[in-house]
Image (cartoon, grey):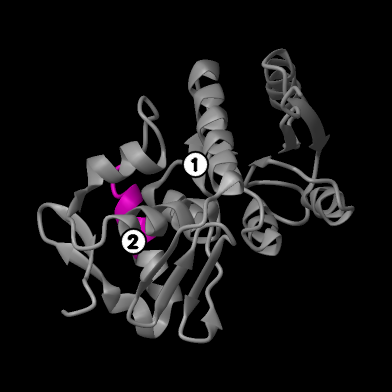
Protein backbone atom coordinates (compact mmCIF):
# COMPACT_ATOMS: atom_id res chain seq x y z
CA UNK A 1 0.00 0.00 0.00
CA UNK A 2 1.37 3.45 -0.89
CA UNK A 3 2.41 5.74 1.92
CA UNK A 4 -0.07 8.48 2.75
CA UNK A 5 0.65 11.94 1.44
CA UNK A 6 2.08 14.23 4.17
CA UNK A 7 -0.26 17.08 5.08
CA UNK A 8 1.18 20.56 5.73
CA UNK A 9 -0.55 23.68 7.07
CA UNK A 10 1.04 26.90 5.79
CA UNK A 11 0.23 29.98 7.88
CA UNK A 12 1.41 33.12 6.05
CA UNK A 13 -0.30 36.46 5.46
CA UNK A 14 1.88 37.59 2.55
CA UNK A 15 0.09 36.38 -0.58
CA UNK A 16 3.27 36.21 -2.71
CA UNK A 17 5.28 34.25 -0.13
CA UNK A 18 2.37 31.96 0.69
CA UNK A 19 1.69 31.14 -2.96
CA UNK A 20 5.38 30.41 -3.52
CA UNK A 21 5.50 28.07 -0.51
CA UNK A 22 2.28 26.29 -1.49
CA UNK A 23 3.43 25.90 -5.11
CA UNK A 24 6.75 24.29 -4.23
CA UNK A 25 5.32 22.11 -1.47
CA UNK A 26 2.64 20.80 -3.80
CA UNK A 27 5.27 20.18 -6.47
CA UNK A 28 7.10 18.10 -3.85
CA UNK A 29 3.92 15.99 -3.55
CA UNK A 30 2.71 17.32 -0.22
CA UNK A 31 -0.93 18.01 0.57
CA UNK A 32 -1.13 21.69 1.52
CA UNK A 33 -3.76 23.69 3.40
CA UNK A 34 -3.16 27.38 4.04
CA UNK A 35 -4.32 30.11 6.38
CA UNK A 36 -3.59 33.84 6.27
CA UNK A 37 -3.94 34.51 10.01
CA UNK A 38 -3.46 32.82 13.36
CA UNK A 39 -7.13 32.49 14.20
CA UNK A 40 -7.88 30.51 11.05
CA UNK A 41 -4.80 28.36 11.66
CA UNK A 42 -6.09 27.38 15.11
CA UNK A 43 -9.52 26.58 13.62
CA UNK A 44 -7.92 24.25 11.06
CA UNK A 45 -5.91 22.49 13.76
CA UNK A 46 -8.92 22.15 16.06
CA UNK A 47 -11.06 20.83 13.19
CA UNK A 48 -9.48 17.42 13.61
CA UNK A 49 -7.47 17.29 10.40
CA UNK A 50 -4.20 15.49 11.03
CA UNK A 51 -1.40 17.79 9.92
CA UNK A 52 2.13 16.40 9.77
CA UNK A 53 3.74 19.85 9.86
CA UNK A 54 2.86 23.52 10.35
CA UNK A 55 4.88 26.18 8.47
CA UNK A 56 4.28 29.29 10.53
CA UNK A 57 5.00 32.99 10.07
CA UNK A 58 5.59 35.05 13.21
CA UNK A 59 4.13 38.44 12.21
CA UNK A 60 0.50 37.62 11.46
CA UNK A 61 -2.57 39.86 11.74
CA UNK A 62 -4.30 39.27 15.06
CA UNK A 63 -2.93 36.20 16.77
CA UNK A 64 0.86 36.10 16.29
CA UNK A 65 2.84 33.07 15.19
CA UNK A 66 4.30 32.81 18.70
CA UNK A 67 0.78 32.67 20.16
CA UNK A 68 -0.25 30.04 17.61
CA UNK A 69 2.84 28.01 18.43
CA UNK A 70 1.99 28.05 22.12
CA UNK A 71 -1.65 27.11 21.50
CA UNK A 72 -0.66 24.15 19.35
CA UNK A 73 0.80 22.76 22.60
CA UNK A 74 3.62 20.98 20.78
CA UNK A 75 1.36 18.32 19.28
CA UNK A 76 2.47 19.03 15.69
CA UNK A 77 6.00 19.79 14.41
CA UNK A 78 6.38 23.51 13.64
CA UNK A 79 8.76 25.20 11.19
CA UNK A 80 8.75 28.93 11.88
CA UNK A 81 9.48 30.94 8.71
CA UNK A 82 9.84 34.63 9.49
CA UNK A 83 11.75 37.82 8.77
CA UNK A 84 12.63 38.15 12.47
CA UNK A 85 16.27 37.12 12.41
CA UNK A 86 17.80 38.42 15.66
CA UNK A 87 19.30 35.72 17.91
CA UNK A 88 16.83 36.58 20.69
CA UNK A 89 13.94 36.18 18.24
CA UNK A 90 15.18 32.76 17.17
CA UNK A 91 15.60 31.64 20.76
CA UNK A 92 12.09 32.86 21.66
CA UNK A 93 10.64 31.04 18.66
CA UNK A 94 12.30 27.78 19.63
CA UNK A 95 11.42 28.14 23.29
CA UNK A 96 7.78 28.83 22.37
CA UNK A 97 7.51 25.43 20.73
CA UNK A 98 8.92 25.74 17.20
CA UNK A 99 10.97 22.70 16.19
CA UNK A 100 12.99 24.59 13.60
CA UNK A 101 13.39 28.21 12.49
CA UNK A 102 14.23 29.67 9.09
CA UNK A 103 14.59 33.38 8.32
CA UNK A 104 13.32 35.26 5.29
CA UNK A 105 14.45 35.65 2.62
CA UNK A 106 15.40 31.98 2.33
CA UNK A 107 16.52 29.73 -0.50
CA UNK A 108 13.73 27.37 -1.54
CA UNK A 109 16.00 24.27 -1.56
CA UNK A 110 16.94 25.04 2.07
CA UNK A 111 13.28 25.57 2.98
CA UNK A 112 12.30 22.24 1.41
CA UNK A 113 15.22 20.50 3.14
CA UNK A 114 13.98 21.79 6.50
CA UNK A 115 10.46 20.57 5.69
CA UNK A 116 11.76 17.11 4.73
CA UNK A 117 13.88 16.89 7.88
CA UNK A 118 10.95 17.71 10.17
CA UNK A 119 8.62 15.31 8.37
CA UNK A 120 11.25 12.58 8.50
CA UNK A 121 11.75 13.17 12.22
CA UNK A 122 8.00 13.12 12.83
CA UNK A 123 7.66 9.88 10.88
CA UNK A 124 10.39 8.26 12.96
CA UNK A 125 8.61 9.28 16.14
CA UNK A 126 5.25 8.08 14.81
CA UNK A 127 6.71 4.67 13.95
CA UNK A 128 8.22 4.46 17.40
CA UNK A 129 9.36 1.19 18.94
CA UNK A 130 8.96 -0.75 22.14
CA UNK A 131 11.84 1.15 23.70
CA UNK A 132 11.51 2.63 27.13
CA UNK A 133 14.36 4.42 28.89
CA UNK A 134 14.43 5.17 32.60
CA UNK A 135 17.02 6.94 34.71
CA UNK A 136 16.06 7.75 38.28
CA UNK A 137 12.59 9.29 38.12
CA UNK A 138 12.86 10.18 34.43
CA UNK A 139 11.02 7.91 31.98
CA UNK A 140 11.03 8.24 28.17
CA UNK A 141 8.65 5.91 26.32
CA UNK A 142 9.43 6.19 22.60
CA UNK A 143 6.46 4.11 21.49
CA UNK A 144 3.97 6.18 23.49
CA UNK A 145 5.82 9.44 22.78
CA UNK A 146 5.75 10.03 26.53
CA UNK A 147 8.08 11.75 28.98
CA UNK A 148 7.45 11.54 32.72
CA UNK A 149 9.30 12.82 35.76
CA UNK A 150 8.00 10.66 38.55
CA UNK A 151 4.21 10.74 38.11
CA UNK A 152 4.22 14.07 36.25
CA UNK A 153 3.91 14.02 32.46
CA UNK A 154 6.27 16.45 30.72
CA UNK A 155 5.15 18.11 27.48
CA UNK A 156 7.91 18.47 24.88
CA UNK A 157 8.26 19.56 21.28
CA UNK A 158 9.02 16.84 18.73
CA UNK A 159 12.59 18.16 18.52
CA UNK A 160 12.99 18.07 22.32
CA UNK A 161 11.54 14.57 22.48
CA UNK A 162 13.90 13.22 19.81
CA UNK A 163 16.84 14.98 21.47
CA UNK A 164 16.00 13.52 24.88
CA UNK A 165 15.31 10.04 23.45
CA UNK A 166 18.67 10.12 21.64
CA UNK A 167 20.49 11.07 24.83
CA UNK A 168 18.63 8.43 26.86
CA UNK A 169 19.40 5.74 24.26
CA UNK A 170 23.08 6.58 24.72
CA UNK A 171 22.97 6.71 28.53
CA UNK A 172 26.40 7.39 30.01
CA UNK A 173 27.90 8.31 26.63
CA UNK A 174 28.93 11.88 25.87
CA UNK A 175 27.37 13.15 22.64
CA UNK A 176 28.81 16.25 20.99
CA UNK A 177 26.53 18.98 19.68
CA UNK A 178 27.48 17.95 16.15
CA UNK A 179 26.55 14.32 16.84
CA UNK A 180 23.21 15.37 18.32
CA UNK A 181 22.41 17.63 15.35
CA UNK A 182 23.23 14.79 12.95
CA UNK A 183 21.09 12.25 14.80
CA UNK A 184 18.18 14.52 15.67
CA UNK A 185 17.93 16.81 12.68
CA UNK A 186 19.67 14.91 9.91
CA UNK A 187 22.76 15.50 7.86
CA UNK A 188 22.95 18.46 5.51
CA UNK A 189 20.45 20.62 7.41
CA UNK A 190 21.84 23.94 8.56
CA UNK A 191 21.11 24.91 12.15
CA UNK A 192 21.87 28.09 14.01
CA UNK A 193 24.58 28.30 16.66
CA UNK A 194 23.34 27.46 20.14
CA UNK A 195 20.31 25.56 18.78
CA UNK A 196 21.15 22.41 20.74
CA UNK A 197 22.01 24.45 23.85
CA UNK A 198 18.68 26.27 23.56
CA UNK A 199 16.72 23.02 23.35
CA UNK A 200 18.65 21.50 26.26
CA UNK A 201 17.94 24.62 28.31
CA UNK A 202 14.24 24.31 27.49
CA UNK A 203 14.23 20.61 28.32
CA UNK A 204 15.82 21.18 31.71
CA UNK A 205 13.22 23.79 32.59
CA UNK A 206 10.42 21.39 31.70
CA UNK A 207 11.97 18.38 33.42
CA UNK A 208 12.01 20.14 36.78
CA UNK A 209 13.21 17.72 39.47
CA UNK A 210 14.64 15.42 36.76
CA UNK A 211 16.67 18.16 35.07
CA UNK A 212 19.98 17.12 36.61
CA UNK A 213 19.82 13.80 34.71
CA UNK A 214 21.17 15.76 31.70
CA UNK A 215 24.81 16.58 32.33
CA UNK A 216 26.80 19.23 30.46
CA UNK A 217 30.31 18.16 29.53
CA UNK A 218 31.98 21.52 29.10
CA UNK A 219 33.51 22.05 25.69
CA UNK A 220 32.24 18.69 24.41
CA UNK A 221 28.47 18.20 24.63
CA UNK A 222 25.91 16.41 26.79
CA UNK A 223 25.19 13.04 28.32
CA UNK A 224 22.62 11.28 30.48
CA UNK A 225 23.90 10.25 33.88
CA UNK A 226 23.76 6.59 34.83
CA UNK A 227 21.57 5.32 37.65
CA UNK A 228 24.51 4.83 39.99
CA UNK A 229 25.77 8.40 39.71
40 or 166, nearer to the observer: 166
**Side of 35 where 190 appears, left or right:** left
Quarter of the rendering occupied by the C terminus:
bottom left
Q: Where is residue 215 in the image (x, y as percent from the top left)?
A: 21, 68
Res 80 seen here: no
Instruction: Give the main secondary structure, helix, strand or loop, of the magenta stretch.
Output: helix
**Side of 134 where 10 appears, left or right:** right
Q: Mark 2 points at which residue?
A: 168
Q: Which residue is drawn at 72% across and 18% down?
A: 29
Outermost residue, left direction?
Answer: 219
Marks 2 and 1 sit apart, C-alpha to C-alpha, by 25 Å
Q: Does the magenta stretch include residue 194?
A: yes
Return the mark for residue 169. Answer: none
113 or 124, nearer to the observer: 124
In this rendering, is residue 22 above or below 145? above
Return the mark for residue 101. Answer: 1
Quarter of the rendering occupied by the N terminus:
top right
Q: Which residue is drawn at 69% across and 21% down?
A: 25
Res 9 seen here: yes
Amino acid sequence: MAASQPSILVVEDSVDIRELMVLHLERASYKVVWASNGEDAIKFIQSGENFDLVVLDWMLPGLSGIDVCRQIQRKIPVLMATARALPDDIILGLESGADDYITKPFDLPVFLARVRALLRRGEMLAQGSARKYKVGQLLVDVDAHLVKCGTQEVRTTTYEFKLLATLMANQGKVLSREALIEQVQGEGVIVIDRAIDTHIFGLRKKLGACADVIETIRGVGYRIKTDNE
